[in-house]
Image: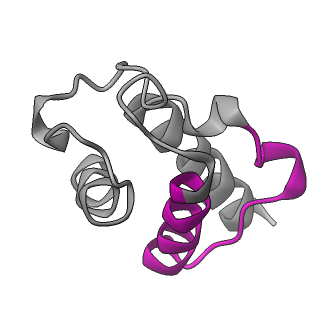
Amino acid sequence: MNETIRTLLAKLGGLPVAVETLADEADLYAAGLSSFASVQLMLGLEEAFDMEFPDHLLNRKSFASIAAIEATVATIVGDRKVA
């Protein structure tokens, strides 16, 4: 999952730094992630993981770092499997 997130972030995030140089906990907004790019990233994640972000997880915290994105996606996918 981490590799897919990093690939999508590199493709859709528009970051001025190489994604591979970022730690999983690095602040993506401080690294240059814009609100527009976070929406593009969200759409890419939804397609890649065949899921949909619920409204309550559409916030800055969910996209703050690679680790946060991974945890959010895992929560959504886990919730979907239970439902």
In this rendered view, identify the residue nearer to me: 49 or 25: 25
Where 57 falls versus 51 (above or below)? above
Magenta region, main secondary structure = helix
The N terminus lies in quadrant: bottom left
Where is residue 13? Give x, y as percent.
Answer: 38, 54
Instruction: Please give the name of the residue rendered at 27% of the width and 66% of the height, measured from the top-left corner.
Output: 11
Q: Say if the magenta span includes residue 26.
A: no
Q: Is residue 72 left or right of residue 14?
A: right
Where 26 falls versus 56 (above or below)? above
Where is residue 39? Give x, y as percent.
Answer: 62, 61
Where is residue 66? Give x, y as percent.
Answer: 39, 36
Where 12 falls versus 72 (above or below)? below
The C terminus lies in quadrant: bottom right
Q: Quadrant of residue 4?
A: bottom left
Asked which colour scheme the image uses, the reply is: one colour
Instruction: Please give the name of the residue rendered at 23% of the width and 22% of the height, measured from the top-left corner.
Output: 23
Q: Residue furthest right?
A: 56
**Magenta-colored span:** 37-59
Q: Say if the magenta span includes residue 52.
A: yes
Q: Quadrant of residue 57?
A: top right
In this rendered view, identify the residue nearer to me: 30 or 46: 30
Q: Quadrant of residue 72?
A: top right
Q: Is residue 36 left or right of residue 10?
A: right
Instruction: Please give the name of the residue rendered at 26% of the width and 50% of the height, measured from the top-left corner.
Output: 6
How many numbered circles are shown?
A: 0
Where is residue 10? Give x, y as percent.
Answer: 24, 56
Where 34 falls versus 49 (above or below)? above
Instruction: Please give the name of the residue rendered at 63% of the width and 54% of the height, measured from the top-left corner.
Output: 78
